[in-house]
Image (tube, rainbow, N blue to C red):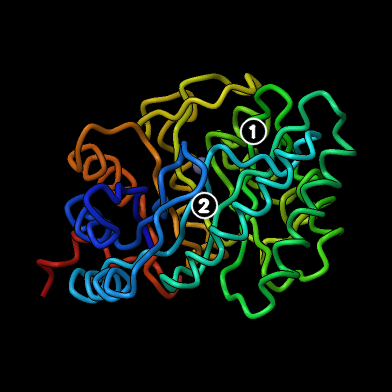
């Protein structure tokens, strides 16, 4: 399942069509403006149109991404409250739109310390789950590059949050290749990839991995800078993406690009590049080689 983050400009129902234009099988969206608090209510007709567009295009909206303004680790009481109530609102939007996963940035402690920040994030998530006991969407905490005072750039940070969350049935992890690379997790060779994924499995558990953001990185390993680059054109290079795509344990995990684009054309190019690296079929069996086609 490969796809891209796509725009909802002009209406939520445009997302699957934008995905189709980019050759996506699945897509990620913002269910509202990423830089504004609050959002317009979703009307029943919009939900219908949105689901119909997915039927028609066969492009599934597999995840939403939360607003960039939300900071679940904020030491500012008012902003903390605003953040978790906004996240709660986002989970409701996802449920209404039948989107199964909501990717969320853990948050920044803004100088108040890692331990306190991590505690606040778990507290925020517990509040959200408490107030949406019949909710279905899973919140997927995203690994971060470690810019500024952001948390989640160590797998241990996310494990600490998970350990404090009461309802663990609705929580998963989103691994972003650019972010973990920038945070200092090596993935450029097969050995490095194996070691990093082993660490992920030991600290968080591979079964928690629900989404992978497939982005190359403009900045080098350990730079802690979050700058996405086209697949194979950045400091990660093409090879590691093949390791993710051919890892049999991850075949069912949706993989979404968030690479720079002016139109669907860039998505088509990046996804084509990724597809060229796939060596295994959907059931984990080796993909038949095209050179066999002409054989009698
Ligand atoms: Zn990401």
Residue drawn at x 30%, y 62% is: 25
Quadrant (top left/top right/bottom left/bottom right) for the C terminus: bottom left
Which residue lies under the disc numbered 1? 186
Task: Indicate the position of residue 174 as horizontal and vertical percent values.
Answer: 59, 52
Label 2 to label 1: alpha-carbon separation: 16 Å
Relative depth, front residue between 132 and 212: 132
259 left or right of 223 in image: left
Residue drawn at x 65%, y 47% is: 194
Quadrant (top left/top right/bottom left/bottom right) for the N terminus: bottom left
Residue drawn at x 66%, y 45% is: 82
Dot 1 beta carbon under 8 Å from ligand 1? no
Which residue lies under the disc numbered 2? 212
16 left or right of 115 in image: left
Relative depth, front residue between 237 and 163: 163
> Which picture quadrant has residue 125?
bottom right
Q: Earlier in the sequence, mark 2 or mark 1?
A: 1
Q: In the drawing, what numbered circle is on residue 199? A: none
Q: From where the camera sits, is residue 8 visible? A: yes
Task: Indicate the position of residue 43 as horizontal and vertical percent values.
Answer: 34, 69
Residue drawn at x 69%, y 22% is: 148
Which of label 2 and label 1 is nearer to you? 2
Task: Indicate the position of residue 226 as horizontal and vertical percent values.
Answer: 54, 27
Are there few (<14), some (14-19), or many (20+) residues within 10 Å of tag 2?
Answer: many
Above or below, 214 relative to 129: above
Above or below, 167 relative to 149: below
198 left or right of 219 in image: right
Dot 2 beta carbon under 8 Å from ligand 1? no
Relative depth, front residue between 136 and 234: 136
């Amino acid at each position: 399942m490969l796809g891209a983050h796509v725009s909802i400009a002009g209406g939520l129902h445009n997302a699957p069509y934008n995905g189709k234009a980019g050759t996506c099988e699945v897509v990620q969206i913002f269910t509202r403006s990423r830089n504004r608090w609050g959002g317009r209510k979703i009307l029943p007709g919009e939900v219908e149109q949105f689901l119909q567009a997915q039927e028609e295009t066969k492009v599934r909206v597999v995840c939403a991404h939360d607003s960039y303004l939300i900071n679940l680790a904020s030491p500012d009481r008012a902003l903390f409250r605003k953040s978790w109530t906004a996240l709660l609102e986002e989970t409701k939007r996802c449920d209404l739109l039948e989107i199964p996963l909501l990717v969320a940035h853990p948050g920044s402690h803004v100088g108040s310390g890692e331990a306190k920040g991590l505690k606040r994030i778990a507290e925020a998530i517990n509040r959200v789950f408490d107030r949406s006991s019949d909710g279905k969407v899973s919140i997927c905490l995203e690994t971060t590059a470690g810019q500024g005072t952001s948390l989640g750039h160590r797998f241990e940070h996310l494990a600490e949050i998970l350990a404090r969350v009461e309802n663990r049935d609705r929580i998963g992890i989103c691994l972003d290749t650019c972010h973990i690379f920038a945070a200092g997790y090596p993935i450029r060779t097969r050995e490095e990839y194996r070691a990093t994924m082993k660490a992920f499995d030991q600290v968080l558990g591979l079964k928690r991995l629900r989404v992978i953001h497939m982005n190359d990185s403009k900045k080098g390993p350990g730079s802690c800078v979050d700058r996405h680059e086209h697949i194979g054109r950045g400091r990660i290079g093409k090879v590691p993406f093949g390791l993710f795509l051919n890892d049999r344990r991850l075949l069912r995990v949706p993989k979404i690009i968030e690479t720079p684009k002016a139109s669907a054309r860039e998505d088509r190019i990046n996804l084509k590049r990724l597809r060229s690296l796939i060596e295994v079929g959907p059931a984990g069996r080796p993909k038949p080689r095209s050179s066999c086609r002409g054989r009698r």
